[in-house]
Amino acid sequence: MLKTINNEWLSNIRGDVLSGIVVALALIPEAIAFSTIAGVDPKVGLYASFCIAVIIAFVGGRPGMISAATAAMALLMVDLVKDHGLQYLLAATILTGVLQIIAGYLRLGELMRFVSRSVVTGFVNALAILIFMAQLPELTDVTWHVYAMTAAGLGIIYLFPLLPKVGKVLPSPLVCIIVLTVFAYFINLDVRTVGDLGELPTTLPIFLWPDVPMTLETLWIILPYSASMAVVGLLESLMTATIVDELTDTTSNRNRECRGQGIANIGAGLIGGMAGCAMIGQSIINVKSGGRARLSTLTAGVVLLIMVLVLDEVLVQIPMAALVAVMIMVSIGTFSWESVVNLRKHPLSTNVVMVVTVVVVVATHNLAFGVFAGVLLAALFFANKVGHFMLVTSTLDEASRTRTYTVVGQVFFSSSEKFMASFDFKEALDHVVIDLSRAHFWDITAVGALDKAVIKFRREGAEVQVLGLNEASATIVDRFGVHDKPEAVDQLMGH
């Protein structure tokens, strides 16, 4: 117990606190922007980000990962807020949390095993592109001062760590924000600031049960939105956890993360916040700034609320150019540049999966669509590839007029046609032996192919013997096969 607390909370105090402050600063404009996307007051996103970050620090399955209000979730709320209002959004947020907790107990986090490396790479690259694209409005139709400050911010971020001693003590993104804020304030530059995004809340959040009728009609209204948010939220959170695992060379508890995200969203809904999930951009900022343990996530949430309530007059002075520089750094660091080089080395199928994932995510701005498309393509390519690894050879004993077919490999829906095409049903034979000792039957399509092969040989007058089925294959063949059941064969043949 004490060892766990030390590892997950106290092993990196200075790095976690500093990185948490950086993340808190980056969360403020994004929470306000995401609230605007969803069509709600800025405090809804800010309260949600505070609550989700604090709760997930204790109950999440991935130390050092940042969860808060996100664009992916905000996009799913637009129609609900427009048609039914904020109270229904709060109810949908609570239901989203309930569904995510159920998913955690059903161990759906294990489904991440089916997401291939190429899909994860495509997801990362698409997210990097979306993060960069999200900064473009702040760089469009602006004065040259904004470009100069953004360039200066990037210079501080990348050059400050090169300074001896001090460069390793303070996170360069935090230095960037402080320096540019002080410079813009004293020079009195006319640039867009955090204060221009919307009014910050002035009071602590309070317990707020959604003011909606507790009826089935309400449930049917919010259920489609809650289901969508639960799926997208878990998908983005688990993908982010996978990426942070790789960055920190550690492991995470995916099912606990599902339950943790659910608990955090319920908490957000009960204090007037919107649903959220893990944020890959902020998580990478946290890791790059030195954050590793749960303390960094807790610090981000607590500092966010303190800044909003106590330092609001300072926060509104932060130039957006400083935060744009930080987010551009995140997009550059997030993008897998190695994947571009590997386009010439990796198989075509791997490249297609990665590119399709990127294109779908960027085109739809929906991470779930891109990941689903990538997983589907990867599965089809895998099935096609494995289907080609099946081989059928044969030998003929002319004395007994017996041909032995030896099947090697995997027989399933993709290879069943090749399996059938390997037999010569018109050859005049007395006996046919189908040796399956080096084969494996996976599904009812494969079983159906075996049935058809046996029945066709019997119709040509040959005696058929099936040998060597392994235990797993024998189980599915015994259950669904009909070639050794006369009454079923009659039905299959149309009697």
Image (cartoon, rainbow, N blue to C red):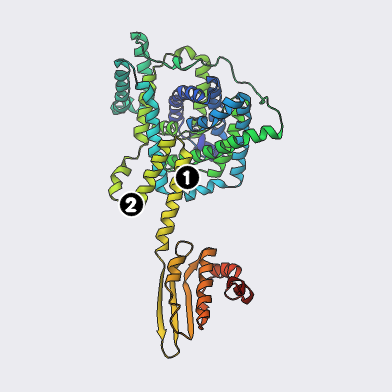
How far from the left and from the top, in percent, is residue 56?
A: 55, 33
Residue at horizontal 29%, vertical 24%? Answer: 155
Pointer 2: what residue?
A: 348
Foreground residue among 134 and 241: 134
How far from the left and from the top, in percent, is residue 386?
A: 42, 61
Q: Residue furthest front?
A: 494
Pointer 1: what residue?
A: 372
Residue at horizontal 36%, vertical 11%? Answer: 190
Residue at horizontal 42%, vertical 62%? Answer: 387
For this view, does 489 lie left or right of residue 238?
Answer: right
Looking at the image, residue 480 lies above or below residue 4:
below
Q: Residues within 10 Å of mark 1 (few under 14, many from 20)?
A: some
* Quadrant in the rendering for residue 417: bottom left
Looking at the image, residue 109 lies above or below residue 276:
below
How far from the left and from the top, in percent, is residue 29?
A: 45, 22
Tell me the kind of residue under disc 2: Leu
Q: CA distance from mark 1 to mark 2?
A: 19 Å
Looking at the image, is mark 1 or mark 2 earlier in the sequence?
A: 2
Q: Residue furthest bottom?
A: 399
For this view, does 479 lie left or right of residue 331?
Answer: right
